[in-house]
Image (cartoon, grey):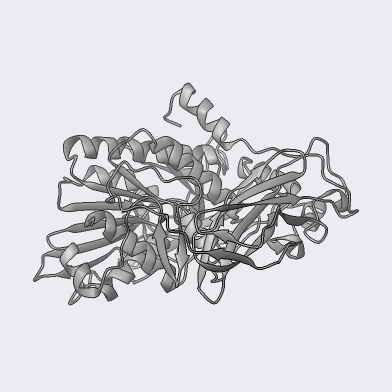
Amino acid sequence: MGISEEKWDRLQKALYWPGPDQEITQLNQSTSPVHSTFSIVGLKESYKVGEHISVTITARDHNKNLKRYGGDFFKAKLFNSELKASVYGEVLDHRNGTYSVALLLPWEGQAQVYVRLEHSSEVVQILKKYRESSFPRSHYNGYFEGPGPDKTRISEVVECNLKWGADGSWSKGDCCCEYKDIKTGTVWQCERPKKLSCNKLVHHSSAGLENPLNPFEMQIFTKTLTNVAITGDTQIINVLPNTTGIGTMERCRSGMMTPVVPAGFYLKDVWKSFVCNTQQFSSAQSGNCLKNKIVYLMGDSTIRQWFENLEIKVPDIKRMDLHTQHFLGPLMAVELKNNIIVHWRAHSVPLRFPKVPITDLHYISNDIDEITGGPHAVVAYTLFAHLDFHPLTFYVHEVAKIRQSVVALLSRAPETTVIIKSGNTAGIKDIFQSDWYAMQQNTVMQEMFQDIDGVIYFDVWQMTSCHYLLEDLHPGPVIIANEVDMLLSYICPA
């Protein structure tokens, strides 16, 4: 994986997730969202802004029995629909079937608690099992093209996948073409075409998904038991003003650690950060902020949304015609008067995209190695959704290579702004893509970059988890606007 034994041990401790203390063979032994409940501890008539309330979650199985072990994946938040206000709450697992949440009261007015069971502890064990297995949940196609007889063109489509682990996570003996990236060491392999040679690979695309679940696993992974609100105290919480303000006026800068909970909160659809003094940027202010900047956005389509927002937000910025498809990239937009350049490029395979030229897909670490850096350069990347289908050890490998490249970039150009966008929550919560996968990836990313001062970590997980919009892999425009304002707050701190 490219990391030391010591770092791997530390990662495993951070990633540890408790589970059942016995083999589960019946649905009624698993956690029930219908019978699990939450209660507010010592609810008072009123509170002041800045105080906390404590919430206890009690997990029960389908027979209404108290659970004896932990590992359920609950999510909690405080919200006020009229104020468009919400704040994320971290769930603490006591590993005995009970959980607690300390929720900050950051706004004046009314609030309510909302708790949902995203996955039972039994389902989380299934997620863990197949994440590390060699079963190929995601399939991919490789498109080979080359000259044929009499000036014709030959095309062949074959199956491709990641090669990882002792036997490879997808392996068909010696039948395959292997494509090893020299710098990262990542190996992609495709079935050998019947007519063309291995060097004729031209395009890549996603193919089908393959469900590994057996009948019993499908039963406890059913949608009716996934991401379901649980019942509890729905009383209105009254929050009075407080002369002592909350929040921070500290300038946004690199090296600031994001607190676990909460990183901020929404009020009237504006994200107010507790990490630093983030601001809302008008169109003109956005252009002034990015004057003489080159912004490199790397990763999946969730960071492409930043590119699309900046296209709207920055006055007179124009997209260049690179003869690529919008959703595949690479993309570039330019504003000549203020000398602003914004790039976006998708990361390399594994990638679940429609048919795309293989040459357009670059590993993030390799692209960072090609950036000179300096006070004019902003590098922002994300890496999560497309790696849900593959072992976490491979994710660690990819992050380790990115870390090496970021360290080298900051060594040669320490004034470069480097931003990591965490994975966000998504609408899909199944064996293929689960928020539990993304949360574990976020833990890896934070752990592996926590000792690098020049890096900024954006916890957009909290921003998407607590918002009133339905969770979606591609968050709504109001969330993206807040993410981009946070980006600009670090580039041009007040």
Residue under the point 52% across and 60% down: 87
Q: Is residue 219 left or right of residue 474?
A: right
Q: Is residue 213 visible?
A: yes
User: Percent position (x, y) of residue 104?
Assistant: 54, 54
Question: Front-most of 134 and 121?
Answer: 121
Q: Is residue 314 left or right of residue 466?
A: left
Rendering quarter of residue 397: top left
Q: Is residue 268 left or right of residue 133?
A: left
- Tell how many labels: 0
Q: Is residue 148 visible?
A: no
Rendering quarter of residue 244: bottom left
User: Percent position (x, y) of residue 309?
Assistant: 32, 71
Question: Front-most of 92 and 22?
Answer: 92
Residue under the point 61% across and 44% down: 131
User: Percent position (x, y) of residue 162?
Assistant: 50, 45
Residue 219, relative to residue 285: is it above or below?
Answer: above
Residue 309, relative to residue 247: is it above or below?
Answer: below
Question: Front-most of 162 and 308?
Answer: 308
On-image quarter of the C terminus? bottom left
User: Percent position (x, y) of residue 112?
Assistant: 63, 66
Q: Is residue 121 left or right of residue 365?
A: right
Question: Front-most of 257 and 317?
Answer: 257
Residue under the point 34% across and 68% down: 152
